[in-house]
Image (tube, coloured by chain):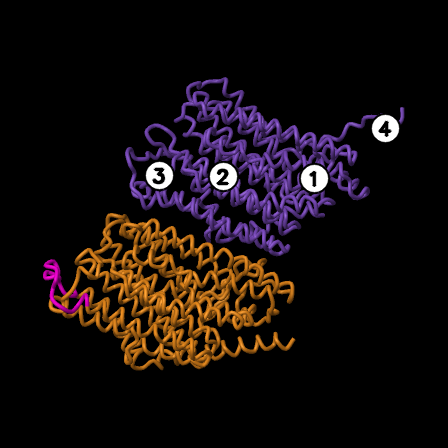
Chain colours: A orange, B purple
Amino acid sequence: MSVGLLTVVTFLPALGAVALALVPRQQAAMHRRAGLGITLLTLLVSLPVWTRFDGSSADFQFEEVHRWLPTLGVSFHVGVDGISMLLVLLTTFLTPIALASAWHSIEDRVKEFVITLLLLETGMLGVFVSLDLFLFFVFWEAMLIPMYLIIGVWGGGNRIYAAVKFVLYTMVGSALMLVAILALYYQHGAATGTFTFDLPILARWVLPPGLAQNLMFLAFALAFAIKVPLFPFHTWLPDAHVEAPTAGSVILAGVLLKMGTYGFLRFCLPLFPDASFLFAPAIGVLAIIGIVYGALVSTVQPDLKKLVAYSSVSHLGFVMLGIFSLNEQGLVGGVIQMINHGLSTGALFLMVGMIYERRHTRLIAEFGGLWKVIPAFSVLFLVVVLSSLGLPGLNGFVGEFLVLVGAFQVSPWRTAIATTGIIFAAVYLLWMYQRVIFGEVTHEENRRLTDLSPREWALLAPVLLFIVWIGVYPAAFTGKTEATISALLAQVGSKASVALAK
Amino acid sequence: MTPADVVVAPPVTLSVLLPVLIVLGAGALVLLLDLLPPRDSKAHLGGVALAGVLGGLLATVIHWGTDARAFRDMIRLDDYALFFNVVICYATALIVMLSMDYLGRSGVESGEYYGLVLFSTAGMMLMAAAGDLIVVFLALELMSLSLYVLAGLFQSRLTSGEASMKYFLLGAFATAFLLYGVALIYGATGSTNFDRIAAAAAAQGRNPLLLVGLALLLVGFGFKISSVPFHMWAPDVYEGAPTSVTALIATGSKAAAFAALIRVLVVALRGAEADWSALLWGIAALTMTVGNVVALAQSNLKRMLAYSSIAHVGYMLMGLVAGGAPGAGAVLFYLLAYTFTTIGAFGVLTLSARAGEEAVDVGDYAGLARRHPLLAATLAAFLLSLVGIPPLAGFVAKFYLFGSAVRAGYVWLTVIAVLNSAVAAYYYLRVIVYMYMREPDGEELAVVPSFAGGLALSIALVGIVLLGFAPAPFADLAQAAVAPLLR
């Protein structure tokens, strides 16, 4: 059995976790270093997925199929297209950063922490590369437990509540998705005689429109909407984000939320095209409510981390709005916005974590005047804040602009409302920045703060590089996904029209 | 004399009973050896019992692929019976291994314990091989009577006595229902043999007497598998009985009752499938919901596992509702996965003690992960398998089971089941919360080192991982096992 690149990338962290399990727990420093080494190695190994990816082709690349449960029609089928390739890279890029961010902040049970994070990375990568519904579901569910432990064991004061809420929300959503997966499997099997969970095969088949398709769409959509999170399924998110340790928040915002939006792109659109068109306006409305609501709630947060958490609800609303515009600009914008949010919000959480480590508080009112004390931090924080609010020239602008162009073609009025979200983003982010960084030093403790350490520079520099790179030259990224997205739209459109013609 | 008056002795083919006889023989041997020295230690009797069970297992494995009948079709040794023999023997073997140190520590180690465990095991195996309602009844009694005594093994504890009494009284009551059902079915069809019942029922069409008999039969079996509303005994008995016995009641006796129930329904009463299927739909939905919802409120782990096992019965009944080879095969696979998982979970309890008492409260496990990371991780794995988190056995088992239900068109029942699984996650994860996320108050949990117990847990752990990652061969076996029923 030959093992391909994606299998290696996916399971390398898990193998590392198994190896680390054998190392005694007393050697905490060794665990940290080895963990970082493994995640960096994974990043290195995953680079060819980017460099050798052919952006002109819409096909799945680096595909591998291994037999797993042949009687059920389950195979170990992995591959990436222009959408998942970016997310795989985002995952391998953010995990070492998350791990390094916990270098000093996590002192308790370091061995377990590193192992859990490595297992989580395998779970996340598995979700993005799976091209088999069964395999996808396995990774989707399995990934829950490491995240549950990261929040529940290494989180803040109310961590247990947050961890349990996170798991229960996700499980309820995915439970119904399991039923829909089974229903789709048997419908396809009964209609074609081929019982398979293979996604490309199922996606080529035209599921007749009607109640069954709509219910299946809703079951999938619920699972993904909770993960995104789409308003009104977002209430787990602020709890989870606030209680999670910095590393957990970075992964949660950077990668986990993308699984929801990715699920819509990968499964809902191609499998249930008619239902997608049917429900697109409703989802668009929910997305806009999320954009405005998230922004308004962010504005009034006294806690930095909560502010960033609610801003995620708003930003992910843009992604959903773009995807369910169901046109090329909207989808490309949505995908780029997924990456942007991972970078910007990941960086915001990192920096909030950094000042939390120094002051052990995240309340905005406790800060002020930091510009004079820690200038380097303040400058980088400004860049990240500006990227998050969508300043032209940085990454956020590209995604939001494309999303709005896409949405405008569907409904100018709604797009106008969504645009207010950008204005509010400027309000809550700049106001926060002003209160934290500018003015006089109001608290004596803040005078003794130290500026960024070399480790923290090393964490932030790569993220900032991409923030600027995507902002200045987005074609390097959009170019690799456009072919995939046009093909996806063509597939959705043709399947829906075939069904209508019948 | 007319030919009808001549009693023809049926040919005695003992080879068909070989697995059962080995286990029974080992039980008798244990009782004999109990009288011989050494009198102070009974650990060697555990070894004899283990050897007997493994002998039964071996006899089962070498018979695989046969389809033998004996004693005028009263006993059938087919792949179906053999599959259950494997499940039951594995369960008993693991439980004997877990018992060795547990009983010694509790001061109740005795030859009778191992003898009774083996007798009840023989009863379970016989239930799976029954081809006649009378054999079902006899085997059920052999199994149950042994278990009633075992439940009361802790003579000094009131709860143990209560468990034994409750189990016995309610069990006897349920057996009476079962027996009445058998009598009515005999009255309706003129036979207690499964095949002849099926033939007679097919010839006469819809017969109210048969349906009443069926309903009474379901009451009797409903008690043994502890489905709602016949589940009331389970939490008290599970809590009061010695933990090793609880594990046997939760796994072996449940598997045996399912073995007989499935064969009775699918073979003897296949003509009434529409009736029992509709009945079981309701019972399944009720059982899983009540089990899971009540489990939410339990802080005693044995009671929690009791309600959780009730919920799992609800899931398994779905497979019967779905029907056909996929449904029945899924139930068999589920039982295999459930047995490994449940014994593992109870097994961890047998190794834990706090302040000299059994550690059964969820609070006792606070902070376990810090001091005994391996044991905590083991218990966590069993609990996650019970939740149905991939890639462990519980997930694959649920997947097969829910798949069979969706395939047969029972989508709403499946929706109820998956929502139940999500509810169940809460109480299983609560134990993990205590182990990993809380600190103990007061005395710390002591883990009793036990080689045999550790080995049993390791086997169970390997089992749930293997069934999770590579379920295909086992699922194929389960499918092959139900084939004889559907011929």
Q: Amino acid at mark 3?
A: Tyr
* Chain containing the residue with disc 2: B
- Confirm whether residue B160 shows in the render: yes
Considering the numbered disc 4 on the image, is that residue within a helix, a strand or a loop?
helix
Q: Is residue A500 above or below residue B266?
A: below
Residue A2 placement (x, y as % from top left):
46, 65
- Left or right, B37 with respect to B192, comes to left
Along the viewing direction, whichever of B336 and A154 lies nearer the viewer: A154
Q: CA distance from mark 3 to mark 2?
A: 19 Å
Mark 3–mark 1 distance (CA, rounded to whole Å): 49 Å
Quote the CA–CA distance across marks 2 and 1.
38 Å
> What's the mark number on residue B68?
1
**Callout 4: chain:** B
Residue at 33% x, 68% y is A342
10 Å neighbourhood of mark 4: few (<14), some, or many (≥20)? Answer: few
Q: Which residue is mark 2?
A: B307
Location of residue B301 (image quadrant)? top left
Residue pictured at 17% horizontal, 57% vertical: A359
Please provide the residue range marked out in magenta.
Answer: A435-453
Q: Residues within 10 Å of mark 3 (few under 14, many from 20)?
A: many
Q: Please tell me the numbered disc located at residue A406.
A: none
Q: CA distance from mark 4 to mark 3?
A: 67 Å
Q: Earlier in the sequence, mark 3 or mark 1?
A: 1
Q: Is residue B64 magenta?
A: no
Query: Given contact means CB atoms under 8 Å apart, are the residues at marks 3 and 2 in contact?
Result: no
Q: Which mark is residue B365?
A: 3
Q: Residues within 10 Å of mark 1 (few under 14, many from 20)?
A: some
